[in-house]
């Protein structure tokens, strides 16, 4: 059996790493196809280096662009590679344009598709990610759902039960595999002059937040208010999309420690040490939940309701007053919730299902 692992962005590299490791451990015949959706060193190469992943066998170098343009380029270029390679199965992870194009390209060539992190739903079609994940799920032969909630979402849409496997989320594997390494290899708190549990961590990059002047302005205002309310430093590794939009709208990140995007080891350590995270990232909602760090999500909905259910996360939208209120409330609660995303063996479980189904 030959497996082609398709990835293109920061979170896909981090969340596919445990699957790649499992392929290596079993000596499977696999290849890595990088679409090049992310390409800056801090959004791409650094993760291959830190997670000691093999070089991609192909890099399509598609780069940035409008949705149709980027998706179309991936679709066409990927088709050529898949026609030449003819893998038995293609694996995609998550909800980016890379994922939708990867799943479509493979399914149209009658190549089996496995979707890692299947079944997440925000039920908000204004998010490009929602469209990507719905399409990917519906053309997949294997839906690797992280939780029972995501499995139920797929069943509701008529996806056959035999296609769905609840595996846990590979982000748990990545966190468990790398937290201890991070603690040995990096010292980001000292580098930034921060005290454990003495700072807030911020990330924001969602298109519907940062490309919208009003929403981005309100988030920046809210961050300033949260900072004055608690008097703690606020560290913000800024995604390149966000940096571009902050500049083009002429906003200032006054009083906020705005830094370059970090490597995974540094970011994980910074997350684990934070008093609270404010974010619109999917991965950060999961990781803070796994690490016992309370999270305020800067969105009106989430496709990760498990984090709300266990009390690790609250929604604040892009609303400054609600950000302050939700931060106060969640910091008063304990952080003894259970991790709902599995036992850290998702990578193994996914490859087990795939190879078992093949025999
Ligand atoms: C993409 C995904 C999003 C995911 C995020 C992870 C889609 C539709 N969006 O959003 O779901 O949460 O990745 O981070 O697939 N840029 C750089 N260097 C890079 C990459 C991007 O400077 O390496 C800048 C460019 O100006 C680019 C912008 O960031 O136009 C946005 O990049 P893009 O890949 O289109 O979307 P993301 O916002 O990164
Ligand atoms: N991350 C990182 N460095 C940073 C910010 C985030 O390594 O400066 C990691 C984070 O640990 C998580 C992933 O990137 O695993 C989340 O990616 P992102 O927020 O870009 O995308 P999303 O998860 O929202 O799709």
Image: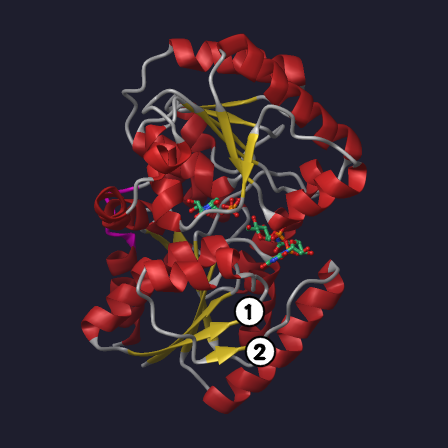
Residue drawn at (37%, 44%) of the image: 266
Q: On the image, numbered disc 1 is attached to which residue?
A: 102
Label ID, residue 7: none
Residue 215, image x and y in percent? Answer: 73, 29
Residue extending farthest bottom: 84
Q: Crowding at label 1, few (<14), some or many (≥20) Cα neighbours within 10 Å? A: many
Height in image: 7 above or below 3?
above
Q: In what quadrant of the picture does the N terminus appear?
A: bottom left
Magenta span includes 260: no
In front of the other: 238 or 170: 238
Magenta span includes 343: yes
Left/right placement of residue 193 relative to residue 18 reads right
Q: Give the secondary structure at mark 1.
A: helix
Q: On the image, numbered disc 2 is attached to which residue?
A: 78
User: Disc 2, disc 1: CB below 8 Å?
Assistant: yes
Residue 231, image x and y in percent? Answer: 49, 12
Residue drawn at (74%, 63%) of the image: 68
Residue drawn at (71%, 32%) of the image: 216
Quarter of the rendering containing residue 2: bottom left
For the stretch drawn in magenta, the main secondary structure is loop
Bounds of the magenta span? 342-346
Height in image: 327 above or below 293?
above
The answer to whether residue 163 of the structure is visible from this angle is no
């Amino acid at each position: 059996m030959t497996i082609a692992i398709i990835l293109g962005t920061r979170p896909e590299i981090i969340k596919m790493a445990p699957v790649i490791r499992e392929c290596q451990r079993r000596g499977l015949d696999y290849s890595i196809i990088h679409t090049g959706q992310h390409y800056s060193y801090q959004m791409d190469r650094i993760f291959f280096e830190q997670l000691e992943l093999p070089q991609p066998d192909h890099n399509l170098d598609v780069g940035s662009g409008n949705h149709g343009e980027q998706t179309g380029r991936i679709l066409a270029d990927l088709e050529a590679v898949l026609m030449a390679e003819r893998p038995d199965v293609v694996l995609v992870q998550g909800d980016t344009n890379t994922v939708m194009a990867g799943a479509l390209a493979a399914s149209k060539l009658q190549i089996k598709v496995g979707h890692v992190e299947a079944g997440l739903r925000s039920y908000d079609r204004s998010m490009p990610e929602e469209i990507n994940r719905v399409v990917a799920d519906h053309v997949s032969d294997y839906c690797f759902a992280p939780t029972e909630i995501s499995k139920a979402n797929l069943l509701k849409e008529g996806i056959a039960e035999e296609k769905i496997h609840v595996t846990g989320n590979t982000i748990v594997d990545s966190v468990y595999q790398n937290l201890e390494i991070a603690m040995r290899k990096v010292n980001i708190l000292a580098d930034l002059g921060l005290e454990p549990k003495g700072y807030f961590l911020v990330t924001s990059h969602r298109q519907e937040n940062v490309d919208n002047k009003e929403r981005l302005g309100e988030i920046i205002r809210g961050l300033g208010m949260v900072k004055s309310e608690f008097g703690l430093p606020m560290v913000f590794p800024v995604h390149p999309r966000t940096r571009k939009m902050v500049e083009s709208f002429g906003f200032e990140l006054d009083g906020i420690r705005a830094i370059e995007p970090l490597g995974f080891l540094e970011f994980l350590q910074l997350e684990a040490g934070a008093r609270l995270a404010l974010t619109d990232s999917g991965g950060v909602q999961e990781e803070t939940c796994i690490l016992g760090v309370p999270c305020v999500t800067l969105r009106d909905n989430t496709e990760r309701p498990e984090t709300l259910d266990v009390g690790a996360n609250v929604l604040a939208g892009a609303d400054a007053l609600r950000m302050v209120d939700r931060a106060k409330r969640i910091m008063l609660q304990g952080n003894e919730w259970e991790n709902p995303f599995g036992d850290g063996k998702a990578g193994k479980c996914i490859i087990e299902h795939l190879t078992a189904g093949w025999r």
